[in-house]
Amino acid sequence: DIAAGALAAGVKEGKDLEKYIRLVGDAAAGSGRPVADMAQIFNRVQGQGKLMTEELNMVEEGMPGFASAMAKNLGVSQEEFRKMVTEGKVSSEEFMTVMDDFAGGMSKEYAKSWQGMVQNTKSYVGILGENLLSGVFEQSKGSLREFEKLMRSEAAQKWAKDTGEKLAGAFT
């Protein structure tokens, strides 16, 4: 989804797109926002070719100090910077440069934290589950509701809890 939005907003395929996607992830990790929300902000800035007040405020809400970093990079006061943004004089390139300096690498650091490790573990469990069940889903689209019902059942929940406790014991 990030790539599709980025391409539609004018990001070139290849290394530019890879860097863009990585930076969206870094900014999302740094701001505590979902990646999809941060991608929307980036895509709007990229698509407009400039940073506007609404997007700046959205970034600043999750990443206090970003506006100050932008102003410093542009060599202007906060007041002048805000005026430039309002007038559409801050380019998407300037936004990306400062964002890279400000948030670049945050997702790697987040992945080292307890919360990051937990989130990554959940993601990998989801990926494994999807891979394990993808064939089942394709073969039984008509029975998917029955499968969902089974997954919600008390018996399935108990099995998952018991199995989780056994896995925790084995892990320990």
Image: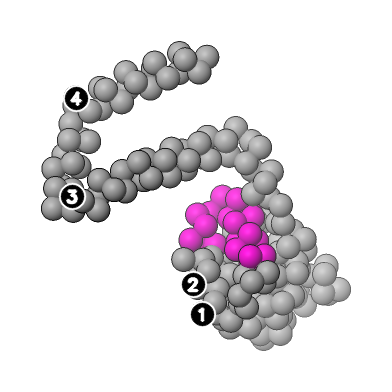
Residue 110 at x, y percent in the picture: 64, 43
Q: Nearer the viewer, mark 2 or mark 3?
A: 3
Which badge, 3 or 1, comes first in the chain's sequence? 1
Residues packed near mark 2 inside 10 Å, few (<14), some (14 to 19) or many (20 plus):
few
Residue where numbered disc 3 is placed: 140
Residue 46 at x, y percent in the picture: 60, 77
Q: Residue at x 83, y 67 (%)?
A: 72
Q: Nearer the viewer, mark 4 or mark 3?
A: 3
Secondary element under disc 4, as helix, strand or loop, is helix
Amino acid at circle 1: Ala
Residues packed near mark 4 inside 10 Å, few (<14), some (14 to 19) or many (20 plus):
few
Residue 160 at x, y percent in the picture: 31, 26
* Alpha carbon separation for disc pair 1 and 4: 46 Å
* Alpha carbon separation for disc pair 3 and 1: 35 Å
Provide the residue span drawn in magenta.
Answer: 18-38
Numbered circle sitting on residue 8: 1
Q: Is residue 151 above or below residue 69?
A: above
Amino acid at circle 4: Ala
Mark 2 and mark 1 residues within 8 Å of each other at the beta carbon:
yes
Q: Residue at x 55, y 73 (%)?
A: 6
Secondary element under disc 2, as helix, strand or loop, is helix
* Alpha carbon separation for disc pair 4 and 3: 22 Å
Mark 4 and mark 3 residues within 8 Å of each other at the beta carbon:
no
Which badge, 4 or 2, comes first in the chain's sequence? 2
Residue where numbered disc 2 is placed: 4
Q: Main secondary structure of the magenta part?
A: helix
Q: Is residue 121 above or below residue 76?
A: above
Which badge, 4 or 3, comes first in the chain's sequence? 3
Residue where numbered disc 4 is placed: 155
* Alpha carbon separation for disc pair 4 and 2: 41 Å
Amino acid at circle 2: Ala
Front residue (pair 115, 122): 122
